[in-house]
Amino acid sequence: MAVSSQPKQSYQIPTHLKVADTITLEIFGFSLTITMRQGIIVLLGGSLVYSTWNHLFWLDQWAGGGPLLHYILTGMLAFATFIIATFRFRERSLEMWLMLALRYYARSRTFVWHSSTLLTMREEHGMSIPQSLATRPVEQEEEA
């Protein structure tokens, strides 16, 4: 019987499953590492800032605060883009918190508890059950 000289195959299990993919950018001699999510947000936000900057040039014609308002509005938009891209609280991003808040405010605030034994007792004694409760299935014991 011949012995095989091939090495055993081994598999490496990925250990970085919860780590976001990143891009490293070399900008002016500095190395900047951002995630794909951050890159998309900065790309979209930066294009919105640029478009706003171009559309608000008419503010520069105002005497006094026109140019200052032009810089403040686009600066606030750039700062909001930066915050949305980088802010994380309790391992959740800002858009996740926004979706959670919208979901919370969209749900009803009133929850009513009904005991299943109360429903069973009402059925046994022939008492009427409200229509909203009658549609809910009640678990019954199987006879052996």
Image (cartoon, grey):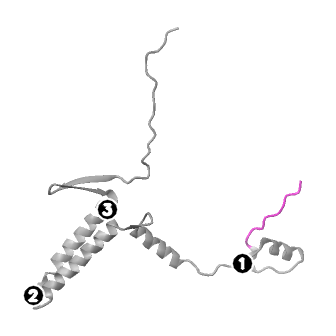
Question: The magenta stretch spans which residues?
Answer: 135-144
Vertical arrangement, residue 38 with respect to residue 118, above or below: above
Q: Residue 85 at what x, y percent from top left?
A: 32, 66
- Nearer mark to the viewer, of 3 and 1: 3
Amino acid of disc 1: Ser
Amino acid of disc 3: Gln
Q: Earlier in the sequence, mark 3 or mark 1?
A: 3
The numbered disc on residue 132 is 1
For image coordinates 76% across by 81% down, the residue present is 130
Q: Is residue 31 left or right of residue 10?
A: left
For image coordinates 26% across by 73% down, the residue present is 79
Q: Please, what is the dominant secondary structure of the magenta stretch?
A: loop
What element does badge 1 sit on?
A: helix
For image coordinates 51% across by 79% down, the residue present is 105
Vertical arrangement, residue 143 with respect to residue 92, above or below: above
From the image, tell me which residue sits under label 2: 61
What element does badge 3 sit on?
A: helix
From the image, tell me which residue sits under label 3: 38
Q: Is residue 76 left or right of residue 29?
A: right
Q: CA distance from mark 3 to mark 1?
A: 47 Å
